[in-house]
Image (cartoon, rainbow, N blue to C red):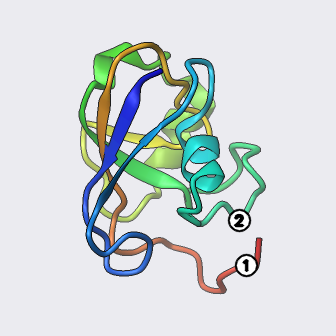
Amino acid sequence: MPVIKILPHPEYCPAGVEITAPAGTSICEALLDNDINIEHACDMSCACTTCHVIVRQGLASLNDAEEEEEDLLDRAWGLEPQSRLSCQAILAQTDLTVEIPKYTINHAKENH
């Protein structure tokens, strides 16, 4: 199983953390399954950008972003070339390093 290293984030994991998840799982599902409650306002349907992450290492191992995801990412706060929507980024067998941006464009946090 690949290891996902999540860099420190003041709200979701202040000290940073390493988790494992099976290949074929989305980054969002892996985070949620490990009690890292990343926002996902659209319930992982690729309709918002609240689960935006920046993949610092291992980006090439993920599935390619579809056009719909790329269009949505244009609206994400802090967009970088390594940005992905975590609900659409599917893990392979390669370890990743992920940064959760400090802000999202979500105006009202959902209770998921």
**Distance from the alpha carbon under mark 2 to that under mark 1:** 6 Å
- Left or right of 78, for residue 29: right
- Left or right of 25, for residue 8: left
Q: Position of residue 100 (x, y in %)?
A: 36, 59
| Up-down relation of residue 28 to residue 10 (above or below) | above
> From this viewpoint, which residue is outermost toward the bottom?
108
Look at mark 2 in the image and give the residue it sits on.
41
Secondary element type, mark 2: loop
Tell me if label 2 and label 1 are in contact, CB under 8 Å.
yes
Q: Position of residue 43 (x, y in %)?
A: 78, 55
Residue at the spot 75% in from the left edge and 58% down from the top edge: 42
Number of residue marks = 2
Residue at the spot 77% in from the left edge and 70% down from the top edge: 112
Secondary element type, mark 1: loop
Question: Label 1 crowding class (10 Å Cα cut-off): few <14, some 14-19, many 20+?
Answer: few
User: Which amino acid type corresponds to the residue marked 1 in the rendered image?
Assistant: Glu
- Left or right of 8, for residue 27: right
Q: Quadrant of residue 84?
A: top left
Q: Which mark is residue 10?
A: none
Q: Nearer the viewer, residue 48 or 7?
A: 7
Question: Label 2 crowding class (10 Å Cα cut-off): few <14, some 14-19, many 20+?
Answer: some
User: Which amino acid type corresponds to the residue marked 2 in the rendered image?
Assistant: Ala
Q: Position of residue 1 (x, y in %)?
A: 47, 21
Q: Position of residue 31 (x, y in %)?
A: 54, 51
Residue at the spot 54% in from the left edge and 32% down from the top edge: 21
Q: Which mark is residue 110?
A: 1
Q: Nearer the viewer, residue 6 or 42?
A: 6
Which of the marked residues, 2 or 1, is nearer the chain's N terminus?
2
- Left or right of 57, for residue 54: right
| Up-down relation of residue 102 to residue 65 (above or below) | below
Residue at the spot 41% in from the left edge and 24% down from the top edge: 2
